[in-house]
Amino acid sequence: MNSVDLTQHFLIAMPAMADPHFAKTLTLVCEHNENGALGIIVNRPTDLDLRGLLEQVKITPQSSGVRSMPVHFGGPVQVDRGFVLHSPAGNWQSTLPVGGEMGLTTSKDILEAVARGEGPPRLLVTLGYAGWAPGQLEHELAQNAWLTVLARPDILFDLPAEERLAAAMQLLGVDYANLSDEAGHA
């Protein structure tokens, strides 16, 4: 399969997805190039919230505006490491640009800014990420494991986690319940 750049696209897990880490998930591809792909699952909240995460990393919220938003399971790789997807991209110590309006930051300075009430207005925090070796994601696409569609920030930041998968499917004009496990070939 020819290489494609799926940066800033959603991966929608097909119903036949056997890997329990990815079954019924919506994943945002944050980087996709000849070295592989990196993404974060955006519809799997955990029991940990942002306040609890800040406490774990020894950051004291100084702003009463620090929300008790859920921290998400971002994927099975480095589950002890935090990733902050945010808009606007801003200027943080370690940020991967995700398209023009979003960034994925792994440095502690963004959490410190959030604790002070000075962080980005739109954010989604995850522990862990999803990673693919070179050509692996393309192979999975050829095997009908995923549907893809250009990601929209409003789905990520404005909808509750349980509504994101259905909203991404609506971008394709498809209801998740109507998806088939079988691939069609002409």
Image: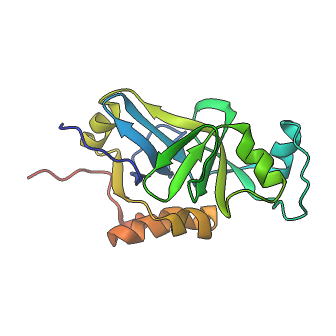
Residue 157 spot, x, y in % from top left: 60, 64
Residue 120 spot, x, y in % from top left: 67, 59
Q: Nearer the viewer, residue 96 or 157?
A: 96
- Residue at x-position 60% and y-position 53%: 90
The part of the image, by quadrant, that contains residue 93 is top right
- In this rendering, the count of numbered labels is 0
The part of the image, by quadrant, that contains residue 139 is top left
Query: On the rendered image, what quadrant is the N terminus found in?
Result: top left
Residue 40 spot, x, y in % from top left: 54, 44
Height in image: 118 above or below 18? below
Q: Is residue 98 left or right of residue 34?
A: right
Height in image: 62 above or below 132? below
Height in image: 30 above or below 134? below
Q: Can residue 49 be seen from the camera position used here?
A: no
Q: Is residue 144 left or right of residue 114?
A: left
Residue 71 spot, x, y in % from top left: 72, 49
View extreme (front): residue = 91
Q: Nearer the viewer, residue 102 or 139?
A: 102
- Residue at x-position 48% and y-position 67%: 166
View extreme (left): residue = 186
Q: Is residue 4 left or right of residue 96?
A: left
Q: Can residue 99 be seen from the camera position used here?
A: yes
- Residue at x-position 34% and y-position 47%: 6
Colouring mode (rainbow / by chain / secondary structure / one colour): rainbow
